[in-house]
Image (cartoon, grey):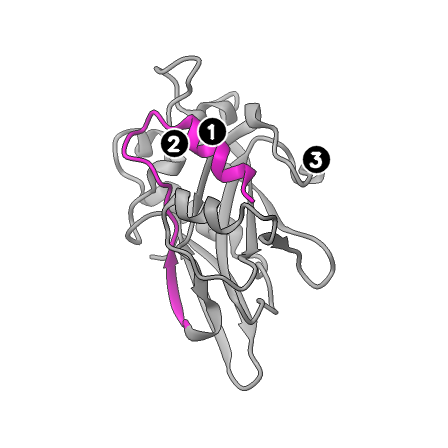
Amino acid sequence: MRTLLLLAFAGCQQAHSITLQLGPTEDTLTAGFGCFQDADPAKLLAQRGLQQGGGLKFSIVVDVISLGGRLPGCRGEELAAACDDGACTIVPRSDGTRFCHEVLVDATAVTAALRDDLVPLLDSIRTQLRVEAVTLDAPDEPVLLRAVATTEPCDAVTAAFDPQDLVGCAYSCPAQLDDIDGPIALSLDTLTRECEREVKACAAFP
């Protein structure tokens, strides 16, 4: 089970199809979507999206980020150092938009996730996001793929996310996408679930 479809593009001679995983394996969720709030360590960031009835509602924005021709490592400090001169930029789709889709997870799937059964939640997210590709024309250079979950509706999402609306964030290692077919895992550079600060940094990059 792949958590997200998400990326398909055609190179000069060969079409590639890439799927994104929201965790290290197909049936797990990265810590980047399981962080606790700084203001109330008993609450998950995900609880910002709770609806009446116990479901969750949030938007997922997936960006392709150019690294300015560089190929840094995966760690946050390596990425920050590679992009501190402003060379890294979000690459919009051919129509000038970013991939954004609003997701609604029902209470049954949320309850199962709280009991460590992530399959219903991941299945629900995957099904709802399988509506369109992130891009059909990825850059021919090293890029980073990032997914941000926010309670902001898609029509309100701007270049800068509101930190108070963030639900989670994760990103891939830098990669040359025309060398890949198959899944790419997303993660967050953190060793603890007390990671709201890391989520904010991830969402603010570059």
Residue 106 in percent (x, y) is at: 45, 34
The residue labelled by disc 3 is: 156
- Residue 55 numbered mark, or none: 1
Residue 53 in percent (x, y) is at: 48, 22
Can residue 86 be found in the magenta stretch? no
Mark 2 residue crowding within 10 angstroms, few (<14) / some (14–19) / many (20+): some
Region of the chain picked out in magenta, as a range: 180-206
Describe the element under mark 2 as helix, strand or loop.
helix
Give me the residue at 27% from left, 38% from top: 117
Mark 1 residue crowding within 10 angstroms, few (<14) / some (14–19) / many (20+): some
Query: Of the residues under marks 2 and 1, which one precedes in the sequence?
Result: 1
Give me the residue at 56% from left, 23% from top: 164
Question: From the viewer's perspective, is the residue at label 3 or at label 2 nearer?
Answer: 3
Mark 3 residue crowding within 10 angstroms, few (<14) / some (14–19) / many (20+): few
For this rendering, which residue is in front, 128 or 93? Answer: 93
State the image quarter where residue 42 is shown.
top left
Query: Disc 3 versus disc 2: distance between alpha carbons?
Result: 25 Å
Give me the residue at 60% from left, 63% from top: 135
Residue 130 in percent (x, y) is at: 52, 57
- Residue 110 numbered mark, or none: 2
Query: Disc 3 versus disc 1: distance between alpha carbons?
Result: 21 Å
Looking at numbered disc 3 in the image, what kind of residue is underneath it? Answer: Ala
Height in image: 122 above or below 140?
A: above
Query: Disc 2 versus disc 1: distance between alpha carbons?
Result: 6 Å
Can residue 182 be found in the magenta stretch? yes
